[in-house]
Image (cartoon, helix red, strand yellow):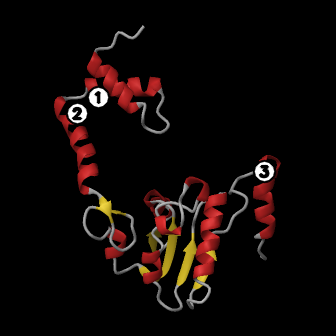
């Protein structure tokens, strides 16, 4: 029996639309909002509105920004001759958390998926081609999926005659992983990409 007031039901329903949020977690979040001060709730609501109204795509890389350019594209300490190509803006922050990549990024906005009607013209590929500088390195960091691999292969073919180095992220066994629990596809990739000591 659902005895929540209509406004609480609506809030719970909205939270369940978030990825990974089930009904119980949505209820906890709704009750947290209700127990917060009006000021905290207003700040939360304003933050959601700000994200939807102020954040836009960086005009160079396609990542997220409050201005024309994202912080990474504005940073003169980044290496413009090393471009890491990712599928989605959130992929940038996975790399940034490592504090080891000093190049710049390019967001495709997805991956090739003919079955879903997504072709090369639907991705941010033309602006990537315009960014090419001879002898630069392009790191293809698309997802390890059929669509991601197809996208990487497509891009690799485009760059064959562009005087650039095209690399792909290494794949294989995770750090701390045990062979016993490794799937066959991952093990095959690890064997193919083996390196010398």
Name the N-terminal-most of marks 1 and 3: 1
The answer for how far apart the CA atoms under marks 1 and 3 are is 42 Å
How many numbered marks, from 0 up?
Answer: 3
Which residue is at 60% across, 89% downward? Answer: 161
Question: Which structural element holds mark 1?
Answer: helix
116 w.r.t. 57: above or below: above
Residue wearing tag 1? 33
**Relative side of 51 to 137, left or right:** left
Q: Do the residues under discs 2 and 1 have CB atoms within 8 angstroms?
A: yes
In the picture, the quarter occupied by the C terminus is: bottom right
Residue wearing tag 3? 183
Which residue is at 36% across, 74% downward? Answer: 60
Residue wearing tag 2? 41
The answer for how far apart the CA atoms under marks 3 and 2 are is 45 Å
Residue 81, percent across and down? 47, 84
The answer for how far apart the CA atoms under marks 2 and 1 are is 6 Å
| Marking on residue 63 | none
């Amino acid at each position: 029996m659902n005895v929540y007031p209509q406004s609480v039901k609506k809030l719970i329903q909205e939270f369940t639309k978030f990825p990974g949020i089930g009904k119980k977690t949505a209820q906890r979040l709704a009750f947290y909002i209700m127990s917060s001060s009006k000021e905290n709730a207003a700040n939360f609501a304003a933050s959601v509105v700000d994200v939807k109204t102020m954040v836009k795509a960086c005009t160079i890389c396609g990542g997220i920004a409050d201005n024309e350019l994202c912080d990474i594209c504005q940073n003169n300490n980044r290496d413009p001759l090393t471009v890491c190509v990712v599928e989605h803006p959130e992929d940038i922050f996975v790399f940034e958390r490592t504090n080891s990549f000093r190049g710049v990024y390019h967001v495709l906005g997805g991956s090739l998926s003919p079955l879903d009607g997504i072709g090369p013209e639907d991705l941010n590929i033309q602006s990537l081609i315009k960014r090419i500088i001879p002898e630069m390195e392009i790191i293809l960091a698309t997802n390890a999926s059929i669509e991601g691999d197809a996208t990487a292969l497509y891009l690799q073919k485009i760059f064959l005659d562009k005087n650039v180095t095209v690399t792909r992220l290494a794949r294989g066994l995770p750090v701390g992983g045990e062979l016993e629990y490794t799937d066959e596809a991952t093990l095959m990739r690890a064997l193919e990409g083996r390196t010398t000591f």
